Each structure stands twice: as C-alpha cells, then as structure tokens.
Image (tube, helix red, strand yellow):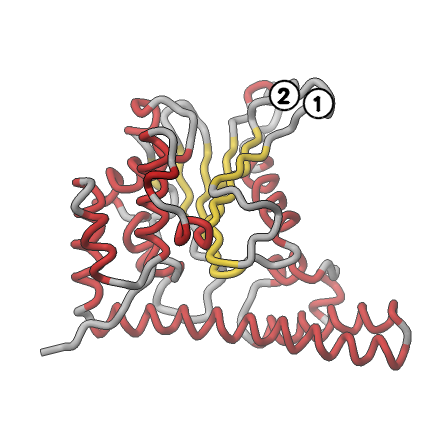
Amino acid sequence: MTQPFKITLRNDYAFKRVFGVEENKDVLQDLLECILDIPPESIAELELLDKEFHKELLSEKLGVLDIKLRLKDGTFIDIEIQNRWHFDFPERTLYYWSKMYNEGVKQGQDYTKLPKCITINLIGEGFNKNKRLHNKYVILEQDTKEPLVSKLEIHILNLEKARLLKEGQCKDNKKKRLLNWLKFIETDDREVRKMLAETCKVMAKANDKIIVMEMSPKEKWLYDSRMKYEHDRASCISEGYREGVTQGIQKGFADGAYQNKLETAKLLKQLGDSSQKIEQVTGLSKEEIEKL
C-alpha cells in the first residue's frame, strides 16, 4: 500500500488543486467570503478563468500557479500563495494587479467601465510590515482617508500569524472562520487539519481532497516538483544577491547592484522563468535579458 506523504497547502500546486478546480468552487467561495467585504450571493457564481490548469502541470519549471476568477458583477480576482515574503513583493503584487486592471480595457471603452480588480496574497513567513493577520490595501486620501476609487484592493494574509493566534482571540465569526482557513492552509499536520475540518462542511470536503492527493504517486511527483522549483528559485536569488554584494564591494555599489541583477536574471532564465517574470523581478529590460 502506498504510504501517504505530508502535504501543506503553502505549496502552490497543492493550493491550486484544492481551491482552483471546478468541483471545489464552493470551497473557494467559502474562503473568499471570509476575506472580502462582498455579499455571499455575489461570490456564489464565481467563474474560474484558467481552464488549462492540468495541461500546464506537465512541466515542473512553471511560473506562479495563481488562481484567476471573475465574479458575476465583473470583478476580477487573482489569488496567489507564497512560502516567503520577498523584499520586492509590494511592487510585484501591484504589478500583477495593474496588469489585470489593464487587461480589462477595451478599445473605445469609457474608463468608468473598467472592472474592479482584487489580488489576494497568502504569505507563509517573513511578512514584516505589521503583526496583523489580514491586511487590506486601497487608495485613500492621506488625511481624510477618503477612497479615491473602489476598484483597487490588495489583500495580504499572514499565515505565520495564523499559526500563533487562538480562535478565542478573534472578535467575530467571520474572523474566526478566516483564522481556521489560514490554519488549515498553513499546517502540514493531518490531525490539525482533521480537527479544523470538523468545524466546517466545505473544509471537510477540502480535507478529503488532500487525503486523496496524499495517496497518489503522481500528485507526490507534482507536489515535490513545485517544492524543488521554489527551493531552486530561492537559492538562485540568494546566490545572485551574494555575488552582487561581492562585486559591489570590488567595483563600486552601482556596478555591483547591476551585476547582481544580471546574475539573478541569468539564473532565473536557466530555471525557465519567462522574460516578463524576470523583467519584473530584476528591473532589467527585455533587451538586456535576451542578451544573457
């Protein structure tokens, strides 16, 4: 009999297999209801937009496995899970938000018709902006806090904080539900997941999905491939940074910083990241990347 392997939904492949498939839209809906200030009936008819999920997973050298969806009122949502907070993450998530917003423009269309766009980022560890469990960023006037528009939302959920919080520390039922979901996503302990699943029918459904995954050799290969990709990518960025620091000392700060970007880009290119992704991570131009 195949021995089950331990799964954590901090792995973006596992996260998408549970929350990003048609048969589990009710699971995704329940999570979104805990995060967003949107009526449940507006979330209920969500449409998943990335239909080629299974076909794309034939390669282990993938970019971000995010979940893209649209609500019935036209709101676009992009959900991404990251094991670790990186220094450039604020710029990165704003870039993805702006790309999603820009894609909503049609030729000759009134700007007021542009859709609301929301990014949701779940961070495994290292988030250092504050100690909050759930951060919601919008565009506000500095003094009056009056919103300029309601079409930008960037949510950051701190899984590290969720691990430490107790349900009794949550003041309302919605926050308790969110905390339980984040604990469920963060842990790799089957018993913890089982206890959490007993509190919610759709969470029990998600747990059943994980149990099936844990028994599948194919799922294990895909899960491990994503883990290897993340470890390799983190090592590349770290090595690129160290080399850049060394060169910065030898040649001057400016030259060293630029060389760091080139080395990081070269390593990311070897791992199969797209030019667009490398541009966003390093700040280099497409032409500079193509020369590597």
| Pick the front one: 99 or 90 | 90
Q: In this figure, which residue is indicated by the disc labeled 2?
A: 147
| In this rendering, position of residue 119 left or right of residue 145 | left
Helix, strand, or loop for circle 1? Answer: loop
| Labels 1 and 2 touching (C-beta < 8 A) | yes
Q: Earlier in the sequence, mark 1 or mark 2?
A: 1
| Pick the front one: 24 or 284 | 24
| Pick the front one: 65 or 178 | 178
Q: In x, y percent, where is residue 292?
A: 71, 75
Q: Is residue 52 above or below residue 229?
A: above
Q: Amino acid at mark 2?
A: Pro
Helix, strand, or loop for circle 2? Answer: loop
Instruction: State which quadrant residue 239 falls in.
Output: bottom right
Q: Kindly identify the residue that appears in the image at 31 percent across and 25 percent down.
A: 40
Instruction: State which quadrant residue 5 falls in.
Output: bottom left
Q: Report how far apart the C-alphas of labels 1 and 2 lie in the structure.
A: 6 Å
Q: Amino acid at mark 1?
A: Glu
Q: In this figure, which residue is indicated by the disc labeled 1?
A: 141
Q: Kindly identify the residue that appears in the image at 54 percent across and 46 percent down.
A: 131
Going by the picture, which residue comes out furthest to the left? 1
Q: Kindly identify the residue that appears in the image at 28 percent across and 52 percent down.
A: 18
Q: In x, y percent, where is residue 156?
A: 51, 43
The N terminus, quarter of image: bottom left
Crowd band around label 2 with a 10 angstrom C-alpha radius: few (<14), some (14–19), many (20+): few
Q: How many marks?
A: 2
| In this rendering, position of residue 166 left or right of residue 290 | left
Q: Kindly identify the residue that appears in the image at 35 percent across and 29 percent down.
A: 172
Instruction: State which quadrant residue 262 falls in.
Output: bottom right
| In this rendering, position of residue 9 left or right of residue 131 | left
Q: In x, y percent, where is residue 154?
A: 54, 38
